[in-house]
Image (cartoon, coloured by chain):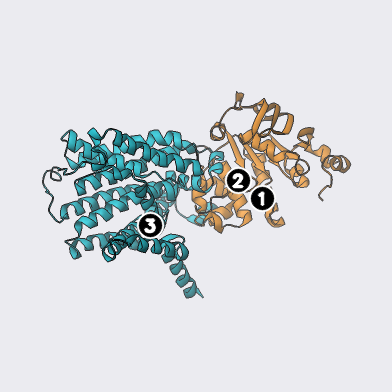
Chain colours: A cyan, B orange
Amino acid sequence: MAASDTIGGTPRQRATDYLLRRHRFRMAEALPWLIAIAVFFIFPTRMTFGSQVLVMVMFALSLDLILGYAGIVTLGHAAFFGVGAYTVGLAAARLDWTEPISGLFAAAIAAGLVGFVTGWFLLRYRGLTLLMLTLATAILLQETGNLRSDISGGYDGLPGLTFKPLLGVFDYDLYGHTNYLYALTVLAIIFFFVRRIVYSPFGQALTGIRENVRRMHAIGSPVHRRLVTVYTIAAAIAGVAGALFTQTNAYVTLTVFDFDNSAKVMVMLILGGTGRLYGAFVGAAVYMVLEDYFSKLSPTFWQFGIGLMLVLAVLFTPRGILGLFERIGDYLAERKRS
Amino acid sequence: MAERVLELDNVRAGYGETVVLEDIGLVLGASETVSIIGRNGVGKTTLLATIMGHTTLHSGQISLHGKDISGLATYRRVTAGLGYVPQEREIFPSLTLRENLEVATRPGAWTMATVFELFPRLGERAENRGNQLSGGEQQMLAIGRALIGNPTVLLMDEPSEGLAPVIVEELARAVKRLAQTSGLAIILVEQNSRLALDIAPRAIVLDRGRIVFDGPSETLRDDPAKLEQFIGVVKA
């Protein structure tokens, strides 16, 4: 049987069918967005916290692009979040550049540049060496900020930042409604951009690199160039997340570069499930909500609750919460078949 | 001989300090198919790995279409015209069959459709993930993935290894068709000497990292004693 017989239609039709099939949105994909919109109406007084969750989702999404798809393990992703956060912070505090959307672009460019330069050198290494080098990058940036505390504000940071109304129209309210919708809109744009990347041939090449880097070399794929490209994109997205963090909180300190921040986002992603896009949503939301709940329950020992949750997650959901749902779905489908 | 597409000149190579190949000289013409046979561990796979740039080249030169590629990174050798089918197949398990082909696609005569025409079975399994394919299908995909990169020289490392006889026959027919009609220059490393000598008109025998025979396949096919002398037990 010829290939054309098995697939049917002209090459153009087959290509169109294939692209539609590949990029088709499934109904379940609307769920996180519907929840995010519902939260806006159900918890109108928790919008500041909601904005923080959305920022962390975006940050985790950027990590998923490099960790989940390209297999780049990093402990210094906070470096890019910090560069983005300080780009808009310094622009507002020192240059009086307070227009929020252009600030996001500036943050993306600054963080992307840092990602490109560091990625070009660091991505020649793998494993523990890469882990240590990425960690060192974040520490170096943090210490540079500390050395020039006259500019960065040091560990006291840049408090009381003010930004112009969104699009010159929407001002920021006390409960953070504008910030929440702003963060949700930016997250949606970033998400569909990332989704497009991971389903493109470039995204397939990233998966190939993660699964067998030697084979990718042997089919003629410029592995280093592709890794640097995705690292730069992820850095830019992390930079946008950092910028949103500064804009929605109206302050920034050098703690954004902390190792804690890099570790936390990795934990969120692993909790939700790597290489799945929506794992970032689930992981960041669950982690942030539990952190908020435990810290209210016990302001002294709240980290115990987080630790216990992580132990349970690793034991019972090694592929993340989404992985657990997949297993349940597979089990139910198997039962239905038999 | 037709245009020389691949030349190895006094190649001495191995893994790090360990030398496996000594004084290898080989010229491959356009559209020529040559089989490399020999006992286990004589350096057949290392020879292909050296052409691909996976080993340490201690001395000598490798040229493709007259250009020295000895110092090029592996992926640049592939873009220059090499295609490689590895012994372990190395299919990307979480990509679909179609995606496995897409990541390797480069413009040229070989397309998804022509690969599916050569291996109709692949067309039927296009949406299956790499880890859902049988050994034979994975091998066909490995060959298809090398072809869709539109190489001028195809290196195949033991394509029949570990496959059921019926699949080996199907594969052999496809490789023979490739050798006769595709215009590709092919180096076929094969443990199954009967199969190799049947497919390729020219044979090279390696022993302890050196070429000990380079000539028409029929010379070995018609002289079992000679073949046994070179490679030990002759497979029926």
Callout 1 crowding tier (Cα within 10 Å): few <14, some 14–19, many ≥20: many
- Tag 1 or tag 2, which sits nearer the N-term? 2
Q: Residue at x 25, y 35 (%)?
A: A149
Which residue is labeled 3 in the image?
A279
Chain for numbered disc 1: B
Residue B143 circle label: 2
Residue type marked 3: Gly
Residue type marked 1: Leu
Which residue is labeled 1 in the image?
B171
Q: Residue at x 60, y 54 (%)?
A: B137
Q: Secondary structure at mark 3?
A: helix
Estimate the spatial distance between the alpha carbons at disc 3 and disc 2, rounded to whole Å: 35 Å
Callout 3 crowding tier (Cα within 10 Å): few <14, some 14–19, many ≥20: many
Q: Secondary structure at mark 2?
A: helix
Please tell me whether residue A82 is drawn above or below residue A147 in the rendered image. below
Seen as rendered, the residue at the extreme right is B225
Residue type marked 2: Ile
**Residue A48 is drawn in which quadrant?**
bottom left
Estimate the spatial distance between the alpha carbons at disc 2 and disc 1, rounded to whole Å: 10 Å
